[in-house]
Image: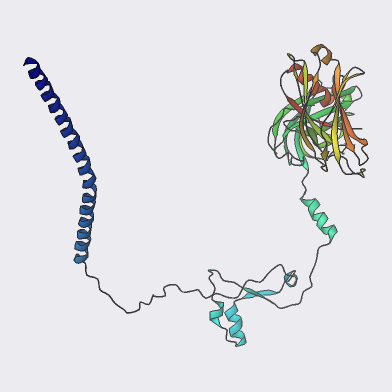
Amino acid sequence: MLLLTVLGATLGVAFGVAATCALAFLCRRLKKLRRLFKIPENKCLESTAKERNILHTAQQFRVKKTMEPVQPRNWLTSPKIYGPKPVITLLEFINCTDYTLERMDERLSARGEEANISSLMVDSSEDLFVISKSAPTDAVSLSDDAESEISEDWKEDVKLHYGIHYNRYKSELYLTIIEAQNINMVENMNHPDSYVVAALITKLGKAKAETSIQTKTLHPIWQDTLTFPVLEEHVQEGTLTLAVYSCDKYSRQDCVGEAQLKLSSLAVGERTDSWISLTAPVKDSSHGEILLSISYLPAANRLIVVVMKAQHLNTDKLKDPLDVSIKLTLMHQSLKLKRKHTRHVKHKINPVWNEMIMFECPYEMLCKSSLELELLNQDCTGQNHLLGKCSLGMNYSDSELNHWQEMLTKPRKQIAMWHKLHE
């Protein structure tokens, strides 16, 4: 009996728990169903409320309908103007002295003619005039010589402002470079860096000095004083040469203008200053110029040469079209160590390569080595013709030497410079 009692109690508890769970599940389902049914009901209620509001607001206003056409008022009126402007550049209007200005309506009223004013109504706010010609004139045209003379007059020379004084007690000639104007004659240099080089030539020799560099200006102001030691007996027979140079970021130097002064014609004993016009330098027979960038990596013993571009190539004597390439030769004294070529660039006067070439060379040999560059043009038969060449190394001068020395003193740095090509 006890066992049955326990079993009955257990079953009762189980049925109670199951019934509770079933009721809870049904309640949750009913809540979900109510939520689902509440949304459309709310929407319907909102829509009906809106309709009621709309109907209610529509009942507040009274709309009066009418079928009468509405005519807009013409507030804008076109101004009364005159005929079109004459073209002053016509031949019949050139060099006319007897012209009178009159309005179109005055001309029509003088002739007694009625003009259709409506045809002359155009949107404009200025009075236009016609020119009545009272005397016949002939058209004048400028000849080519006159045009060339006018264009030459517009060309301004480079002018240099300087001061000069000789100190007899110290036996020194002082040259003060003050300023310069019109430094805009160098091609591809809009705002160049400029400086002045002065040279005093006497029987004893040649002394040379230069000013500081003024950057990115067409009107440089230096206020630099250059000192030349010279005896008084050699002053009157001396010649002073002044030259203005421009340079860019690749150390390309171009002479803008130069002039020579005879000290015998100057009052060097007094402090004087004056302006002088510089003449354009005589262009040398250059075969163009090339832009190179070189660097040396000591850890890898590598010489890196970047052939960038060339310009102003002398192609007057060429019969074949351009097909240019660069041949680079690394030499140690008179021995050729390595030779390499760049790619070919066709039909371009200013070719661009931007090609990198590497040579292996120890640093000990680099001081006695040199780099030779040849610009070659290939004809239709495959033969190469030399257009120009240049060499970099310690055995050369000017920019070719400076470029090589700067590479040795600044390892692992790319240094780019322009070099002129020669035969």
Q: Is residue 275 visible?
A: yes
Rendered location of residue 129, percent (x, y): 61, 73
Rendered location of residue 368, percent (x, y): 86, 15
Coloring applied to the structure: rainbow
- The residue shown at (21%, 50%) is 41
396 and 71: which is toward the camera: 71
User: Is residue 17 rendered to the left or right of residue 378?
Assistant: left
The extreme top residue here reads 364
- The residue shown at (52%, 76%) is 80
The extreme front residue here reads 1
Q: Is residue 231 visible?
A: no
- Quarter assignment of residue 248: top right
Rendered location of residue 109, percent (x, y): 58, 84
Q: Which quarter of the figure is the C terminus placed in?
A: top right
Rendered location of residue 157, percent (x, y): 78, 43
Q: Which quarter of the figure is the N terminus placed in?
A: top left
- Quarter assignment of residue 245: top right
24 and 288: which is toward the camera: 24
- Quarter assignment of residue 362: top right
> How many marks on residues?
0
- The residue shown at (14%, 25%) is 14
62 and 137: which is toward the camera: 62
The extreme bottom residue here reads 112
168 and 46: which is toward the camera: 46
